[in-house]
Image: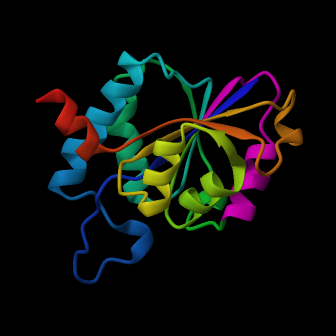
Amino acid sequence: MRRLILFRHAKSAYPDGVEDHDRPLDERGRADAPRMGAYLAAEALLPDLVLVSSARRTRETFALAGSALGPVDTREEPRIYEAPAERLLGVVRETPDAVRTLLLVGHNPGMEDLASTLVGYGDRYAFARLQQKFPTAAIAVIDLEAERWSEVVAREGRMERFVTPKGLATTEG
C-alpha cells in the first residue's frame, strides 16, 4: 500500500507588482501552515518524501509546516506549479518505490482534481467536503492499493481523511 498526502499551499498575499510565482504567504497563511504541520506530526502522517512546487507560497508553506515533521527528504519539483491533475499524476507515478508515503505541496485546481481522480471509496463525508472546496492549507490523505507508484490508477484510492484549517479550529477550541 502507498499513501499520498496532498497539501494545498496556505493562504497567499497578492502584493502589487509581484508575479504569481513569487507571491508570499499572508498573515493567515503564516498561521495556518504550522498548525497543519503540527497536525500531520500529531497524527503520525509522516512522509518519506516531500515534493514541493517551485512557487514561493508552496515553499513557504512547507518551510513552516515541515518544521514539525523533523528531517524529511524534501525536493522542489517545478512541474507541480499550477499543474493539472494529469501532470501531477505523472509526477506521482515517477516516485521511487522505496517511498511509502509521498507528500505533494501544490496548487488548486490540480490538487482537488487529482484527489477526485484517484479516490474511488473511503470516507464519503471527507470526499464530499473535498468536492465542495479544497481550501488553502487543506490536506487530503489518500491510501492507494498499488504495489508501485507507477501502477497508481484512477478510482482505486481510498479517501482516508480530508482536513482543513477551519475544521481543525472547530476541534481545537
Where is residue 80, by image quadrant? bottom right
Structure colour scheme = rainbow
Picture layout, residue 62 above or below residue 113: above
Q: In the orientation shown, which residue stands out farthest toward the bottom?
A: 17
Q: Position of residue 150 (x, y in %)?
A: 87, 41
* Quadrant location of the C terminus in the rendered image: top left
Q: In the orientation shown, which residue stands out farthest toward the front?
A: 124
Picture layout, residue 110 above or below residue 95: below
* Quadrant location of the N terminus in the rendered image: top right
Where is residue 110, by image quadrant? bottom right
Picture layout, residue 91 above or below residue 81: above
Q: Position of residue 35 (x, y in %)?
A: 26, 33
Nearest to the observer: residue 20 or residue 47: 47
- Horizontally, residue 150 falls left or right of residue 76, namely right
Question: Does residue 97 belong to the magenta stretch?
Answer: yes
Magenta residue span:
85-102
Q: Residue at x 29, y 58 (%)?
A: 11
Q: Position of residue 125 (x, y in %)?
A: 46, 44
Question: Does residue 7 belong to the magenta stretch?
Answer: no
Q: Residue at x 35, y 56 (%)?
A: 136
Q: Residue at x 79, y 52 (%)?
A: 154
Nearest to the observer: residue 134 or residue 129: 129
* Numbered label tally: 0
- Horizontally, residue 168 falls left or right of residue 71, namely left
- Horizontally, residue 20 falls left or right of residue 5, namely left
